[in-house]
Image (cartoon, rainbow, N blue to C red):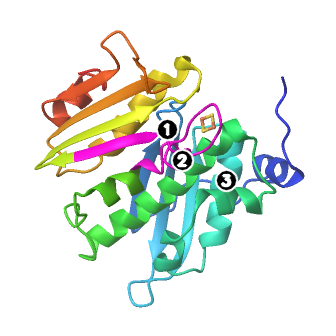
Amino acid sequence: MALKYTPEVIEHFTHPQNVGELEHPDATATEGSPACGDMVTFTIKVNPDTHILEDIKFRSYGCASNIATASMATVLSKGKTIEEVKAFHPKVVAERLGGLPAIKMHCSVLAVNGLKAAIKQWEIAHGLATEEEIQLNEQTIRRLLKGVINPETGRSIVSMGMVNYIKIEGGKVYVEVSLQGTDPMYAANIREEVTEKLESMKCIQEMIVRILERDKFEMGADNGEKTASDKSKAMTEGGEA
Ligand code: FES
């Protein structure tokens, strides 16, 4: 079935703004979506005195929705302070495009996460942020998992109440997600995305991600459980440690 796109999405897809790469950018970041394997790269220039994002370009290796949301994200962020841009929510960017089909919401998450990743790189380069500054606690993990989108509904697994349980012991994190009626074909995809989010926190040394079907059955050939003795192992084994 053909997806229905708004005129704004079609306009930004066919005539995207700020496409390409800046010469000598202050920061660059590439973000990938485990939901579809697509990627987006942002290059930015930030005024170090005012913290205003003075120039920005993007290159999308994604779909029409990703191109449109990345284009809109550059339009909305240019001329804003990095603090303002960091407050952007994918839903707001999608709304400015008149909305996206539910199964395409993850494309807007990819665009906004890519933009924020470039800002984070700029902050790190200017001593305004460190990789380790984020506290490892349940609130942080929950915030991180808000970026995991259920591919079937286009909504965050956190807002859908799919995250049953988060437990932290030292550098070890245990996360349990319930599919709650979501088609089991998405279990591996959700698990992969949860794992990638956890892997982005350098202070996590070990993780267990368990996916349950309707709070009852464990999913996947290895019972849906992912254990990584360390993140490099998880990375090199393609998230199937
Ligand atoms: Fe991959 Fe849209 S970014 S399907």
**First along the sequence among labels 3 and 1:** 1
Instruction: Give the label on residue 110, or none.
Output: 2
Locate residue 106: give its quadrant. top right
Instruction: Give the label on residue 69, or none.
Output: 3
- Badge 1 is on which residue? 33
Mark 3 to mark 1: distance in Å? 14 Å
Answer whether labels 3 and 1 touch (C-beta < 8 Å): no
Locate residue 91: give its quadrant. bottom right
In front here: 225 or 237?
225
Queried whether the magenta region covers residue 95, the answer comes back as: no
Name the residue type under label 2: Leu
Which portion, as a residue range, is magenta? 145-167
- Which secondary structure is most common in the magenta stretch? loop
Dot 1 falls on a residue whose secondary structure is: loop
User: Looking at the figure, which quarter contains the C terminus?
Assistant: top left
Dot 3 falls on a residue whose secondary structure is: helix
